[in-house]
Amino acid sequence: MLLPINGVGMNSTMDDMNLIQQTQRHHLVVRELGEEIDLEIGPGDDDTSFANATLISDPSRDPSTEEHDEGKQMVMVTELHNDDQDLSKSQPAKRKKKVVKRWREEWADTYKWAYVDMKDGTARIFCSVCREYGRKHRRNPYGNEGSRNMQMSALEEHNNSLLHKEALRLQMASKDKIIVDKPIYVKALMSKTAGSIVEAALKRDPHEIEFIQSLQEVVHAIERVIAKNSHYVNIMERLLEPERTIIFRVPWVDDRGETHVNRGFRVQFNQSLGPCRGGIRFHPCMNLSISKFLAFEQTLKNALSPYKLGGAAGGSDFDPKGKSDNEIMRFCQSFMTELYRYFGPDQDLPSEEMGAGAREMGYLFGQYRRLAGNFQGSFTGPRIFWTGSSLRTEATGYGLVLFAQLILADSNRELKGLRCVVSGSGKIAMHVLEKLLAYGAIPITISDSKGYLVDEDGFDYMKIQFLRDIKAQQRSLRDYSKTYARSKYYDEAKPWNERCDVAFPCATQNEIDQSDAIHLVNSGCRLLVEGSTMPCTPEAVDVLRKANVLVAPAMAAGAGGVVAGELELNHEFNLMQWSPEDFESKLQEAMKQTYQRALKAASDFGYQKESPEALVHGAAISAFLSIAQGMTDQGCV
């Protein structure tokens, strides 16, 4: 290679050569010339734990192909490379300046904006945001010259370049304005009739991702029912349209006197079997699609339970985290001021859900009582404190474990000694831990929005109480690991790669994706009991089905809350006092009835009891037939 003679050209060329050498030293893999690329960092000596982790990977490429492409496409100066190797042999190895891992994670975002192109016959590293190279990306005006202690790596200089930072900021700001629709996973259905139902829903509500996913799962489950009787096609089309959808604004004032506005929802999906019942969820991600899917699933869950009720759900995109009690009270009062006219013993029975606990339900009921002028509300959360009803909050969590025990008992097994992973750290998850201990199981995990906690020794009652204290004080689960040495908290991770026999997802919808399902299968999981509504993505469901992992659907396993709510109403109306033993006996009997109904419906339509989908299909079929009968008897209303 011929180099320019003048000093300026010499410095410029040497700068570019130094950049190329930096790519070689950091083992940067250049995918293609002239295109935006991903660059991967190779093993370094400044952070041994980080050296084994791949920041950016491409699972679709074969390793042998990558090696071939690297050898074919990497543009390098052979002479400089050999000289660099000779220098590294002659000079003693020096430890690089320690780099904080966070910086490397930031670099990973920067690498995708870099590419290699030819400039004046020489390979140069460009930034695809601002299209510059060389010194314009260096904070050090002397480039890579001078002593080693004064040098910064070319990648760090590139990342810290003010020019590049501003260009990247503008790039990200423009991306924030672009709304990218999530892809909708469409299941392959065997019959054209079932496919037409899904197709009509997709045309009517193409942007309601969660609702479309939910109805696809149900239509797939009842496909044989629809194929046997075309009358059910019309019933299903009517069922998929809610009876009443309420969307309203919720203005409220914070402690500083500033006004805020949130959006409220209530979807009363179907009342053919009785007054509506369903939760109220306060979460920033709450929208109409989630409200409809929760109401639809609640309708089926209530129809499957021994106590026939209609289904509803709703809430707001309000986030109670970080809010004072007075702010939450003002919000709840504003929320109920709009909805109180739609609530009542014979209309709608709201209950607790994510973000709406006993405090929020108390504020909501207080405003309802004030506006309605009577004490005949049907709010299931606060009644614990006012009427002494037993085990109300435990019902859903206990019911999940009772349902799992029923499944295992059918195959002459039991929960005792089984390792169980649990996600979530709310009331349902905590009560699942409690009941698992009562049956002799070994619960080892819980999780929150930041990561998950694993205790290899398993939780006990004292540890569960400690976890409750941590949550009550709004501390991080990480504090648990500071007390118990055999525990560890993993940031930005899920518990599904832990070795287990039974899994209880109790956090939120779609918490288990395809890769999580693969981890569960590889970890030895043979039974998954859904504590949250629709916890698995469609891709995850396919993985679990092919691996013959038995799934207990939330529609059946989560019926404990419905049972408890109905028992509370009977408690009030009949002035009875339920002991904890009586309540649990009633709960166990109701869960057994629900389990048997799901199995019978599956058997009636040709699903074997041993099939991993038997409970999923049976629960949906039994619930749908109950609703369809009520809708048929009541006519077209």
Image: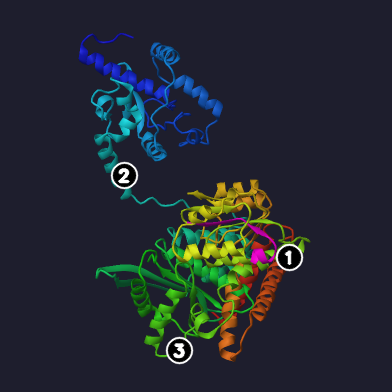
Identify the secondary structure beneath mark 3.
Answer: loop
Kindly identify the residue that appears in the image at 34 percent across and 9 percent down: 1
- Specify whether residue 451 is painted magenta: no
Of residue 631 and residue 473, the one placed in the foreground of this image is 473
Work out whether mark 2 precedes mark 3 in sequence or the reverse, and give the earlier one.
2
516, above or below 630, in the image: above
249, above or below 113, in the image: below
Of residue 576 and residue 173, the one placed in the foreground of this image is 576
Taking the image as shown, residue 248 lies to the left or right of residue 293, namely left
Taking the image as shown, residue 121 lies to the left or right of residue 100, namely left
Whole-angstrom CA distance, mark 1 to mark 3, is 45 Å
Q: Which marked residue is nearer to the observer: mark 2 or mark 1?
A: 2
Instruction: Identify residue for label 3.
Output: 375
Identify the secondary structure beneath mark 1.
Answer: helix
Circles 2, 3 touching at the beta carbon (< 8 Å): no
Residue bounds of the magenta highlight = 435-448
Instruction: Identify residue for label 2.
Output: 172
Instruction: Identify residue for label 1.
Output: 603
Kindly identify the residue that appears in the image at 40 percent across and 27 percent down: 96
Circles 1, 3 touching at the beta carbon (< 8 Å): no
Category of crowding for the residue at label 1, using alpha-carbon neighbours closer than 10 angstroms: few (below 14), some (14–19), many (at least 20): some
Q: Residue furthest right?
A: 412
Residue 321 can be seen in this image = yes
Q: Position of residue 447 (x, y in %)?
A: 52, 56
